[in-house]
Amino acid sequence: MTQAAVSELDERVPGRRWTVRLDAAGRGSAAVRISCSRPACAEQRLPTAAAGRAAAVAHLKAHLRAAPAPRAGAYCACRMEGCHTHLPASGRARAEPWRCGGPVVLAVITDREGRWWQAMECCSRCAAATPGAKTAATSEAPAAADHPAPEATGAPQFSGHQAAAGPVPAPRSAPARRRPPQAKIAQRIIPHDLRPAALRDELVELGDLFRAYQQRDQPDLALLADLQERKARAFSTWADVTCEGALRWEARRAEQAAAAARLQHQQRTGGITGGDGSAVPRLLTVPAQWEHARSVLAHVADHTPLPGPDARLLVLMLTLRTAHTGTGNLVGQDITATEDLVEKLTGCGWLELPGTAGDLLASRPENATPITVPSLMPREDGSGPFTFGKKMRPKLSGWAQKVISDKKLRKAKATAATRLLALTLATQASAAGDVGSGGQGIAVEFLAGRVPVDSGELKNLVDQLTAADWLTDAALTNTHLTGRLTERVLPLTCPLRA
């Protein structure tokens, strides 16, 4: 750079520039903080990223409204950083040196991920060459005599420089720049500056592998399960780095998808089998559904308002019909309990009906009775006693109905206590049907909590299930029940984790 050009730079004022940033407030929290490079601006804290982005944009707009118009005598703020559009500070010449030109503007640049916003004074040509820059205000072009042409040929030209003999030439349009392709996974852009680099490389590779999997002619469930497990680990690490809750939720979804794919692969290849080595097609297919079924049985055991197995079984079925919102529709054929028991549930306030218990028992599908269970209605924050959604509820209800209406149980006229024991054993057996976990059986104390009968009656219930071809090789001691569920009922089971 020549001495004349350097002198010209010294006479001109540097362009203004300020930055508004959005950063996580800390680990394990969704809160964010907003900071501004202007010393007079105090830091702000907002509860969510969405609220933070809105406040950051509003803060920048307030600065833009209050800022004076761009100064025609300023040189580009981006030049102070030695950006690639300008000549190097060392003075080493390039084959085609960048030439600034056009009026000075106030340009706004934002990060693609919405993490920072920057306003700066620069010439219109630099603004046009900066990807994503938007012009907020433009200065008035100064008179030609105010800024004579530089003496040195080839020196960089700044806004306001023009020959004295002619008008300001129109800025040349910068050549279109081809942006490098953005790496994505699960419709999310992977930031180019994500650290550690090993995490970014893993996410990029996983995105490529998932896209390659989608092009396969035949599914490979084992491969898909491995990919989902890798995705769950990578997204969990990504969430730890950025403190973004949505990434952690995505990691949990990937874990569930991996478990579902692994189970489907085992079922197709015989990995989970019955006693004859054949695969078991279960009514509830994934571990998440099995855990939800166990959670409902545990909740009902702790919250049934009336004693006895008949009340426990009725409360269980009504809970499964109303678990998501606390409300549901019921017809008479759905109820096997007596009118007196339904009236007791309404009398204690656990169940609410628009009419009488008799009206409910007499209702038909064309005029179903709306019912309400106040204790199951969502609280003000939207939470309830269960974590599953509205699509899961009918699956669990259908599973329980399938168990208690088993053909051989109906033929044997099994009691409510026997059906409760059948439901309990279906959720407390291994994948192969062995009662309990690890071949140790189920504690009698646990069974007494789930099936409200005296310990002396438990043996009669076990005998009824054995006679109904539900249980085999049963042995009941003072402390444990051991045995094995028969092949025909394995599709109704919810296996315990090994």
Image (cartoon, grey):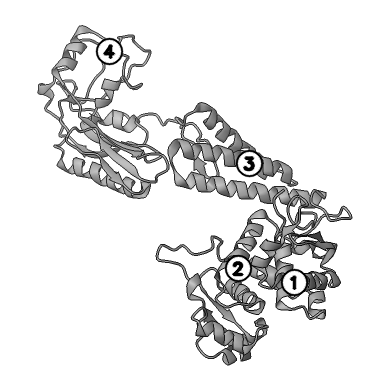
Tell me the residue that label 2 is attached to: 301
For the residues bearing labels 4 and 2, Cβ distance under 8 angstroms: no
Tag 1: Cα neighbours inside 10 Å, few (<14), some, or many (≥20)? few
From the viewer's side, name the closer residue of 265 and 457. 457
Res 229 label: 3
For the residues bearing labels 1 and 4, Cβ distance under 8 angstroms: no
Q: For the residues carrying marks 1 and 3, which lies nearer the camera in this image?
A: 1
Q: For the residues carrying marks 1 and 4, which lies nearer the camera in this image?
A: 1
For the residues bearing labels 3 and 4, Cβ distance under 8 angstroms: no
Q: Is residue 180 above or below residue 432?
A: above
Res 456 label: 1
Q: Secondary structure at mark 1?
A: helix
Q: For the residues carrying marks 2 and 1, which lies nearer the camera in this image?
A: 1
From the viewer's side, name the closer residue of 113 and 306. 306
Nearest to N terminus: mark 1 or mark 3: 3
* Residue 272 visible in image: yes
Q: Which residue of the protein is positioned furthest toward the right in this rendering?
A: 276
Q: Secondary structure at mark 4?
A: loop
Q: In the rendered image, which quarter is residue 26 located in?
A: top left
Nearest to N terminus: mark 1 or mark 4: 4
Q: CA distance from mark 4 to mark 2?
A: 87 Å
Which amino acid is tagged 2?
Ala
From the viewer's side, name the closer residue of 153 and 52. 52
Q: CA distance from mark 3 to mark 4?
A: 59 Å
